[in-house]
Image: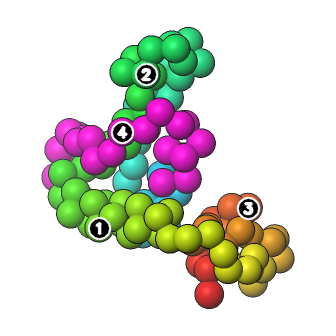
Amino acid sequence: MAGDSRMICVHRLQDPIEANLIRGLLMNEGIPVELTGEGLVGAYSGVPKLCEVRIMVPPIYRSAAETILQRYDEHRQRPEGGRDWVCPRCGESNDPSFEICWSCEGASNP
């Protein structure tokens, strides 16, 4: 990044939990991520535009981040179903909608 501290917004959400899930997905792929606006959600929950959580990445990671976000959106739109899977690293049971372990973030859905 050669000293470039700029970050660009690649996604906006109103759900801080989902924003943190996406943050984990991006970080798992080696993409530096910052969430902005997360602290405003509780204070301005009645005003949607004021409580957006923005997912910010360095410009050089934009394309990779957008690809991961597209995969995430496609995965979310699939019909419900499937079976829980057990993380081989920590042994936690995970919903089939999770691509990485919710507990340790260290293993991918087989």
SS of the residue under disc 2? helix
Camera-side residue of 23 and 70: 70
Picture coordinates of residue 37 (x, y %)? Answer: 43, 26
Q: Residue at x 45, y 14 (%)?
A: 47
What's drawn in magenta, residue-wise?
A: 1-22
Q: Are marks 3 and 1 in contact (CB under 8 Å)?
A: no
Magenta region includes residue 12: yes
From the image, tell me which residue sits under label 2. 48
Picture coordinates of residue 58 (x, y %)? Answer: 25, 50
Q: Quadrant of the C terminus?
A: bottom right
Distance between mark 2 and mark 4 Cα atoms: 11 Å
Picture coordinates of residue 79 (x, y %)? Answer: 55, 71
Looking at the picture, which amino acid does disc 4 mark? Arg
From the image, tell me which residue sits under label 1. 67
From the image, tell me which residue sits under label 3. 103
Residue 94 appears left or right of 31? right
Distance between mark 3 and mark 1 Cα atoms: 24 Å
Q: Give the color scheme: rainbow, by chain, secondary structure or one colour.
A: rainbow
Q: Residue at x 27, y 60 (%)?
A: 66
Looking at the picture, which amino acid does disc 1 mark? Thr
Distance between mark 1 and mark 4 Cα atoms: 15 Å
User: Reading the chain from its start, which is encountered first: label 1 or label 2?
Assistant: 2
